[in-house]
Amino acid sequence: MDYWRKPLDAEEINVSQGEVHIIEDRCKGCGYCIEFCPKDILAFSIRFNKKGYHPPEVVGTEKCVNCHYCEIICPEFAIYSVEISTAKEG
Amino acid sequence: MKPAVLTGEHYMTGDEACAEGALAAGCLFFGGYPITPATEIAEHMSERLPGVGGTFIQMEDEIAAIASVLGAAWAGQKSMTATSGPGFSLMMENIGLAACTETPCVVVNVQRAGPSTGLPTMGAQGDMMQVRWGSHGDYEIIALAPCSAQEIFYQTITAFNLSERYRTPVFVMTDEIIGHMSEKVIIPPADQIKTEWRPKPQGRKDRFLLYKPGPNGVAPMPAAGEGYNVHVTGLTHDEKGYPVMSVEAQHQMMTRIKRKILGNLDDIIMTESHQLEDAEIVLVSYGISARTCLAATQQARGMGLKVGFLRLITIWPFAEAQIQALAQRVKGFVTVEINLGQIHLEVMRSAMGKVPCHLVGHHGGTIISPDQVLAKIKEAFPCP
Amino acid sequence: MSLTALAKNGAVPDHPLEDLIRSDRIPHIWCPGCGIGTAFAACLSAMKASGIDLQTICMVSGIGCSGRAAGYVKLDSFHTTHGRAIPFATGLKLGNPKLNVVVFSGDGDLFAIGGNHFIHAARRNIDLTVICLNNLNYGMTGGQVAATTPFLARTTTTPAGNPEAPFNLPLLAWAAGATYVARWTILHTRELTECIQKAMKKSGFSFVEVLGPCPVNYGRRNKEKSLQTLKLYQEQTIIRNNADPTDLEVDFSKKVVLGEFVDKERSTCIENYDKTCRLM
């Protein structure tokens, strides 16, 4: 998903960085997170989970902006992101 | 403001006595829907409940009425509804939910003649099997059948106590005749009325099991908002309350629901004996028809006939053992009821062919006269 | 730090809703691509964000796929009979007015078999939050026509197309007197979460309709894969707050209007009861 236009202060804004966590065995492979990730950092993996679905995997870790959209569109409680600094402290 | 317990001597209808009994038992929620001949119970509760801190609501139909009663029960209240035939039919699905989820509540059925709309203003006792089997599946319930306004007052209290003690729906099966008849009702002082509450859970909330039975077979029951995070479902569930779709879970759940009633028969079954000691012919009856039988017994004794009378106060679970014991020593039974043979079938089943069982029944709409009972006694058991 | 390294340190944080779901019952029964899970998650996020004491929140569901929601929330939860979630919830709320009662159920449950209860609860303005996952059909039983199925849509009981017209749910809620009415799709999950939160805090009868796909039973028969349904939600919807309730039909051949349609004040059933009946 691309931005229609670039904000004037885009250079000054400090975009947070996120880390995506996936609970693979909860995934049913609907692909919503992959389709609607604004940064296109998710893709179907070739692995099967224990239910026989291909869970997503992160293909562009450093590009995650921690927007949580994958987390809130996921019907399965299977994916979520955390802010990287927080994750390191934890 | 009137107190919950209206101690004193009153002249009131059976329906009013029912409402006063409920209030004396601590009922604080009534979800109802108007229907003859039970409407007066709702009317009386609508007037009285707000004054004692309770809530009355007239729902959009009887289905909603019983559903709201179950909701209020899980909110921690003693709750009830009252209805008659057509409304009782509508309530059946949620009565099943109450049985399955072990939800205490009291349902009063002021019976009128059916089927369908039938005779709305005229009494009958035709819902006695419906109360036992009306909802789908196997389950146990408790049903009581009072025979006077005074007894309606007391039996309504007993109904609440039994429903709390056994976490089960309890039914008070009255009829249009005693519901609308005005009689003397004595209401004792509040401290002489024994009221019970559902067993409360103890111990760690996160380890609580909603359907793990205590010593008498009944599991403790928390209310919503108390922090137990209960899950209540009409699906077959395990002790935790979680749905489990398996033969084993079904077996365990059904065993528990049946055992808590069938394992406590001595505590639940109430009967009253009249001249049974030397009786050869035993009348069996309940509710308004019990009054017919009392008169018939007296008259028969006056004629020198050895007639006794077993009055069923608890209808369900059925007083099978009592009938069985009597069947060993009497010549026969005559069941008297305003239907075409419902409890009569239970008497026959319990007598197990040992002695003849007869019915004095009626299509409904009026009471049975003692003369009809005497005629049946003479016809069925002719003097040698 | 890599994910594996985090896991070894035991430092992977839980899913943010982990404490509100019965994780011992996950994965849930809903099919791949079903919208219920997303709407349900939005509901849990809203509960958390609302600041309401979670121990006072109860969820009541009826029967059907959406009716299973109550079984997955780690709060007092009630899975009742078909269509009767609202009257059960009414008793729960009247029995203890301190409870915050959320009804989460489907369109068939709330508007066909339970339709009468819905309009009466809205009329008497009982303080409930009703969330309806509208997937346009009866999913649990295999995809039969519902009171919300679009005209001419195919279902197993309308193999030639639905000859009936569907309900406009926000219009129905508005007409019956609901004090808060909104509609979103599962794609608009942020707005949805905000509106559910608002609905929960609002005293009075609140209604939130959530459009969600039923790819297996509705989508399959109407040539719509779940992602295509979500694209429809993206392209064929328009957000118009306070829209005229008569303009809110769900017809994706035109634009489907989303937004917050009603937010008004009216004294609740309990307030009126206390004022009217308790002064005798």
Image: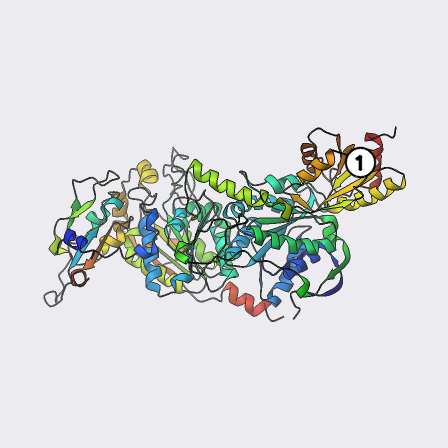
Residue at position x 57%, y 56% in the image: B79
Horizontal and vertical percent for residue C113? 48, 45
> Taking B267 as reference, is C45 left or right?
left
Residue furthest to the right: B303
Residue at position x 9%, y 66% in the image: A11
Q: Is residue B105 visible?
A: no
**SS state under label 1:** strand
Q: Is residue B144 above or below residue A14?
A: above
Horizontal and vertical percent for residue A55? 21, 44
Horizontal and vertical percent for residue C25? 35, 47
Q: Is residue C174 visible?
A: yes
> Taking A49 as reference, is B230 left or right?
right
- Amino acid identity at mark 1: Ile
**Circle 1 crowding by C-alpha within 10 Å: few under 14, some 14–19, many from 20:** many
Q: Is residue B52 above or below residue C117?
A: below
> Taking C46 as reference, is B292 left or right?
right
Residue at position x 17%, y 40% in the image: A47
Quarter of the figure that contains the N terminus of chain C:
bottom left
Q: Is residue B226 above or below residue B339?
A: below
Quarter of the figure that contains the C terminus of chain C:
bottom right
- Asked whether C97 or B262 is in front, the reply is B262
Dividing the picture into quadrants, the one containing residue B247 is top left
Horizontal and vertical percent for residue C7? 19, 53
The residue carrying mark 1 is B281
Colour treatment of the image = rainbow
